[in-house]
Each structure stands twice: as C-alpha cells, then as structure tokens.
C-alpha cells in the first residue's frame, strides 16, 4: 500500500498535465487478438472488427483519463470496485481487464443496457444495477458486498451519447424536446422547470448552477415567452437566450443556462454531496477513491470534502490550540488534480475541462463501521 501511495505521490509532482503518451486501448486490444494464434490476415480482419467495435464505443462515449483512473485505483486481481457512473462502460472495462470485480450503476437505463451488452463477456465479474451512485451502500449490500470495496470511481456528469442524441434534450446545438433527464424514468424535466418554476427559483438556478450573470434578463425573457405558450424545445430556449445575451466569441450564449438546468433537473450537486459522504464507509481501509469532475461547482465540492476529511489537525484562531480532526478519513496521494494531456485532448476535446482527484481511505474496519453510524442518514 505504502509503495503504491508513494508512486502516486511521485507521479503527481512530475505529471500534473496528465500523460502525453498515446492511449493504449486500441493497440492493446489488437495485440491480444493476435496472440490468440491467428494468421496475420485473420489479425487484420479481426483488427477491422475490433476497430468497428471501437468506433461504436467511441461514438457512444470516449472514457476520460482512463489510464490515470487505473493508476489511481491500482487494482489487484480480485479487488472489488464500485463504478457509480457506468455510462458506456469504458472505465469498467479497463478495471475488468485488470482483474477487478466491478459492481456498477447508472441512473440512465439506456446507458445500463448498452454497457451490460458491451461487458456481457465478463460474466459474474461484472454486475450492474439501475440506480443512483448516492445509493452506493444499498447497491453494494444488494450485491453482497457488506464490508466495503477496494475502489470507487465516479466520472461525473453526462456522457457524449447524452449530448449527441437530440432526443435527450441536453444540447442547445441540436433541436429536441426540452428534457435533460439522465434517468428517463424520473418525473422532473427541463420543460417542466422552465415553464412552471417560479421566477426567483429560476434566477437562483441560473446564477448558482450556471454562474450566469445575465440570469435576471434571461428569466424575464422566459416569463414573457411563457405568456404566449409553453417553451417545449431546446431550439426555442436557445433562441430565446440568444435574443437576450448576444454571441461573443465561440461559446454559445445558452451554455451556462443549459448547464444550470441540467444540474437542477438531475439534482447533480445533491447526489454528489450524499455520495461523497457515503464513500467514507463504503471504502475499506486502504480503498481508493477516484473522482472526475467537469465543472468548477463539482470540483469545488470534491476538493472541499477531501480537504476537510484529510486534515490531521484542525485549527481556528479562537481556539487555544489545534485539535485532532476526528473526521480525518483520507490521505490524499496527489495535491493537485490530474488533467488530460495533449494527446488525450487532441483525440477527445470533450475531455478539456476534466479534473481527476483521488484519495485513499485511512483507518481500521471498526472505524469505517463507526463512521457509518454518523453518516448513514
Ligand atoms: C461521464 S459518463 C460516464 C462514462 C463512463 N465512465 C465511461 O467510461 O464510459 C457519466 C454517466 O454517469 C451517469 N450518472 C450521472 N449521475 C449519476 C448518478 N447520480 N448516479 C448514477 N449514474 C449517474 C450518467 O447517466 C452517465 O451515463
């Protein structure tokens, strides 16, 4: 354990901007295929099949910082890892290839179906559930893992498939129903929020979750438009926002409002806060946590939580002396987050705002269980 932690610490000081090396995925897949004893022509044919498979997967979602996640989680054969954001199954697949058992969930039934099919070949090594990562304790109990897991990966937000599929209503660039639900079985949609939410709450959402300075003007325009009829499509909403916020530079004026609505419709920050608290008792001592965030609100929340629970001592000016932190649950193998390197960014520009933070669970089993009582609410 110490050895692995030391390795992470060294890497974090030397490679802050992620690896510059080519991704290993496709090359490695082909190498494995050819080791099966095929002739070179068969290898070429297999190669074409592999690359078609790769293309499907890349079209669904390209996993972000996959090598780095693997390095942080440092799984050994038989370790159990919880993947709370299964998506297209890319991170899970890498973990399964490393010999880990993966228990996964996704709140999107369509993602779950896709990843289950993709990873069906792993049999019992892979178990996936429809659910929210803030129910990780219940999901792990249902999977028979009552003593905690060796690793947890949360790759926050939506997948490329969500953005690219106009029918899911996440994109201002493609006209579709104003939906934005990650979980298509949930009741609240962006359409309901935009048309039925009161003005003050909409202003709060656009300001707090989108940091949109023009929140007041946008809400005024929405309320006026509501008098004429419901705003039902992403195109209608994007055009309305553009009529209030003029285009400047390359960023679409609707970017922040769409981000804010998505966060609110899916209660993304609420789920993240509850999930962070549960990692404390869902990880075994020595277990590792990897979290990839894509915007500053998420990253700030992760950073604060990990800082608060990794300080050995607490101090305040009004105290006579520093006190031992009774909630010091983690050590942090790297001070700064890892971000994608140039190679990854060239191949996947959508990875540009990704930040990976990691932590290692301290303490004894009994401490984990004690903490469960203070966290499980
Ligand atoms: C960025 S994608 C994950 C991609 C995945 N790591 C991969 O390599 O293909 C995020 C996924 O997490 C899911 N998700 C987001 N919030 C969730 C939550 N609170 N609980 C469960 N799944 C969630 C989304 O539906 C989406 O499929």
Image (spheres, rainbow, N blue to C red):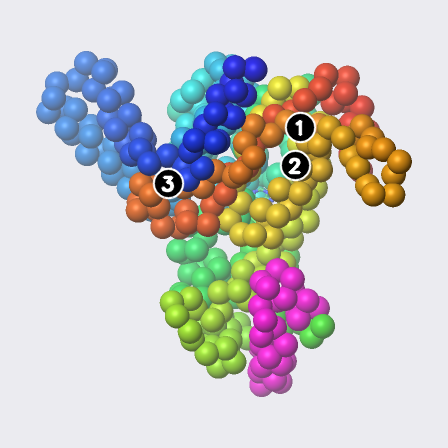
Residue annotated with mark 3? 341
Q: Is 341 on the left or on the right of 216, as rendered?
A: left
> Looking at the picture, does residue 375 appear above or below residue 361?
below
Q: Is 96 on the left or on the right of 308, as rendered?
A: left
> Looking at the picture, does residue 115 appear above or below residue 253?
above
Spatial CA span between label 3 and label 2: 24 Å
Residue annotated with mark 2? 306
Residue drawn at x 56%, y 15% as measured from the top left:
1
Please tell me whether residue 216 belongs to the stretch shown in magenta. yes
Residue annotated with mark 1? 330
Residue drawn at x 56%, y 55% as measured from the top left:
181
- Of mark 3 and mark 2, the one earlier in the sequence is 2
Residue 300 seen in render: yes
Spatial CA span between label 2 and label 1: 7 Å
Magenta range is: 201-230
Residue drawn at x 17%, y 17% as measured from the top left:
38
Spatial CA span between label 1 and label 3: 27 Å
Q: Quadrant of residue 53?
A: top left
């Amino acid at each position: 354990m110490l050895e692995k932690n030391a390795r992470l610490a060294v890497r974090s000081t030397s490679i802050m901007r992620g690896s510059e090396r080519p991704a290993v995925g496709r090359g490695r897949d082909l190498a494995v295929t050819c080791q099966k004893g095929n002739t070179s022509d068969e290898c070429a044919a297999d190669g074409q099949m592999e690359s078609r498979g790769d293309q499907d997967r890349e079209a669904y979602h390209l996993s972000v910082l996959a090598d780095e996640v693997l390095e942080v989680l440092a799984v050994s054969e038989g370790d159990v890892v919880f993947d709370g954001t299964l998506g297209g199954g890319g991170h899970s697949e890498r973990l399964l290839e490393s010999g880990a058992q993966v228990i996964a969930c996704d709140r999107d039934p369509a993602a779950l179906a896709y990843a289950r099919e993709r990873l069906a070949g792993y049999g019992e090594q892979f178990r996936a559930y429809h659910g929210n990562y803030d129910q990780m304790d219940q999901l792990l109990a249902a999977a028979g893992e009552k003593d905690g897991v060796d690793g947890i990966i949360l790759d926050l937000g939506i997948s490329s498939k969500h953005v690219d599929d106009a029918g899911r209503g996440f994109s201002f660039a493609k006209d579709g129903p104003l939906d934005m639900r990650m979980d298509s079985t949930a009741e609240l949609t962006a359409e309901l929020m935009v048309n039925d939410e009161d003005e003050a709450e909409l202003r709060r959402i656009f300001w707090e979750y989108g940091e949109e300075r023009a929140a007041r003007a946008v809400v005024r325009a929405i309320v006026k438009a509501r008098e004429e009829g419901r705003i039902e499509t992403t195109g209608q909403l994007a055009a309305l926002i553009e009529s209030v916020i003029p285009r400047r530079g390359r960023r679409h004026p609707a970017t922040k409002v769409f981000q804010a609505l998505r966060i609110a419709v899916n209660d993304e920050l609420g789920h993240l806060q509850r999930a962070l608290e549960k990692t404390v008792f869902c990880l075994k001592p020595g277990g590792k946590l990897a979290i990839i965030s894509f915007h500053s609100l998420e990253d700030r929340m992760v950073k604060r939580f990990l800082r608060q629970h990794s300080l050995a001592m607490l101090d305040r000016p009004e105290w006579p002396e520093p006190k031992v932190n009774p909630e010091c649950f983690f050590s942090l193998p790297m001070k700064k987050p890892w971000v994608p390197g140039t190679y990854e960014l060239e191949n996947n520009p959508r990875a540009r705002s990704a930040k990976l933070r990691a932590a290692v669970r301290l303490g004894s089993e009994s401490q984990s269980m004690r903490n469960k009582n203070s966290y499980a609410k």
